[in-house]
Amino acid sequence: MKQVKDIQIRETNTNDFDDIMAIEKQAFGYDKEAQLAADLLADKTAEPIVSLLAFYQGEAVGHILFTRTYFDKQEAQPMMHILAPLAVKPEYQRQGIGGMLIEAGIEKLREKASTLVFVLGHADYYPKYGFLPDAARLGYPAPYPIAEEYSDYWMVQAIDPKGFEIEKGKIRCCDELNKPEHWRDDESDR
Ligand SMILES: CC(C)(COP(=O)(O)OP(=O)(O)OC[C@H]1O[C@@H](n2cnc3c(N)ncnc32)[C@H](O)[C@@H]1OP(=O)(O)O)[C@@H](O)C(=O)NCCC(=O)NCCS
């Protein structure tokens, strides 16, 4: 593991595509999340996105992507997002880079007047950064049913202090992330 300090974080542009793919592939150890990131970056229904890279000494070492989410079956939509994917190169993990990307990303979401941010992920990781487990219990069922034993993995955080007062309802993601294969609990297609 490399000891790092002075991490730089900035928004991505089209020239960063290869760096993003490399980080996603190395962090996850398979290509599925890299393909998802590529698909999301090209999805118009995902906009406005927040896509950030973390750099250490000029090397891109971490990436985070937030895409727009919606309430299912509603006309007027508040601005909401979902975090997926988050990736840090293996040799740079466990040094706070993931946390820095989450915090910087939420600040960017606040600037875009986003009200709520969702994530489906590790229930002992994301609560460190303000996410509340079991978003369905709080009134926001996931796009597809989540097994009871994993209900804590579907999480939400209010970006706007009034975020939880605006609306409740089932969540729909952008077209690419709303595909059922991203919500299945199996690893056979990796
Ligand atoms: C998850 C990930 C992004 C975290 O990035 P990171 O820079 O290592 O995270 P941070 O340094 O900010 O936080 C580290 C802390 O989070 C916890 N943590 C990190 N990865 C975790 C995991 N997979 N499960 C549970 N806790 C985890 C640890 O408790 C760690 O604290 P510790 O060092 O005191 O043990 C990174 O491990 C990664 O890219 N993993 C592979 C891809 C992945 O699983 N992405 C998330 C999908 S939901």
Image (spheres, rainbow, N blue to C red):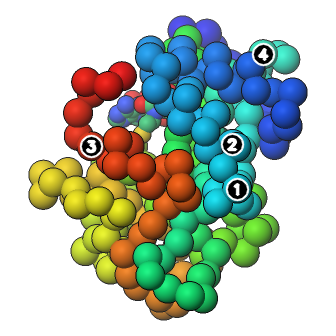
Say which mark, if any, is on residue 41: 2
Per the image, label 2 sits on a secondary structure element best described as: helix
Q: Residue at x 65, y 22 (%)?
A: 21
Q: Which residue is mark 4?
A: 59
- Mark 2 and mark 1: span between their CA atoms? 8 Å
Going from the N terminus, do you reach mark 4 or mark 2 first?
Answer: 2
Q: Residue at x 38, y 81 (%)?
A: 169
Say which mark, if any, is on residue 44: 1
Q: Is mark 2 within 8 Å of ligand 1?
A: no
Per the image, label 1 sits on a secondary structure element best described as: helix
Residue 6 location, x and y as percent? 78, 27
- Mark 3 and mark 2: span between their CA atoms? 22 Å
Q: Which residue is mark 3?
A: 184
- Mark 3 and mark 1: span between their CA atoms? 24 Å
- Does the CB distance between marks 2 and 1 fall below 8 Å? no
Q: Residue at x 56, y 27 (%)?
A: 34
- Does the CB distance between marks 4 and 2 fall below 8 Å? no
Which residue is nearer to you in this view: 124 or 80? 80
Going from the N terminus, do you reach mark 4 or mark 3 first?
Answer: 4
Q: Residues within 10 Å of mark 1 (few under 14, many from 20)?
A: some
Q: Quadrant of residue 57?
A: top right
